[in-house]
Image: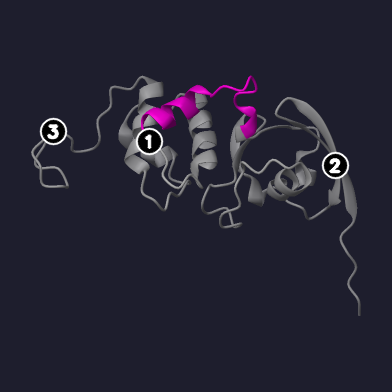
Amino acid sequence: MVVGHPADVDVTLRVNGQTRRLRVESRVTLLDALRDHLGLTGTKKGCDQGACGACTVLLDGRSVVSCLVLAAQCDGREVITVEGLAPDGGLHPVQEAFVRHDGFQCGYCTPGQIMSAVALLADGGTRSDDEIRELMSGNLCRCGAYPNIVAAIRELAGAAATPAGAGTGPRADGEAR
């Protein structure tokens, strides 16, 4: 028995402020539609299982891991990728803060981290470093830039938060606080 290909579907998306029409197989993810059909490679394919956050985009203003969303489910919806954060060619304030705080090392996770941070800040849920870490926990960084990422988000949130345990006892590197 020969199994046929899934049916193609027509999808219209508003991506980074532009209406884009695609014809894709019904099983194509939003991630693959963005990267392979629209050439928007800022959104990274990490685990392809929704566990790492590298493919995070904003869908109707909310952060989603685009590897778990079918493109067909996004018909008529607004998608913002890291390329669409600062359409004037400059940097978005979150991108600037990541640069100031060295919130990236290899940079592979950075687009997803930035998109999650944009959504987190838009929701206003950043009262402490612990809360920032919790809200960003779906984004993995294998290089370990987490303290710098938290510092960048804290700066933009205007939170006067300090890391948990700050000011009590020696630091992890043995130096006094």
Position of the C terminus by quadrant: top left
| Residue located at (61% from left, 23% from top) | 89
| Residue position marked by numbered label 2 in the rendering | 22
Q: Position of residue 159 (x, y in %)?
A: 33, 22
The mark closer to the camera, 2 or 1, is 1
| Residue position marked by numbered label 1 in the rendering | 102
Looking at the picture, tell me which residue is in the foreground, 35 or 90: 90
* Left or right, residue 148 beside residue 15: left
Dot 2: element? strand
The residue segment tinted magenta is 83-102
The mark closer to the camera, 3 or 1, is 1
Residue 167 shows which numbered tag? 3
**Mark before the other along the chain sequence, 2 or 3:** 2
The mark closer to the camera, 2 or 3, is 2
Q: Are marks 3 and 1 in contact (CB under 8 Å)?
A: no
Looking at the picture, tell me which residue is in the foreground, 91 or 115: 91
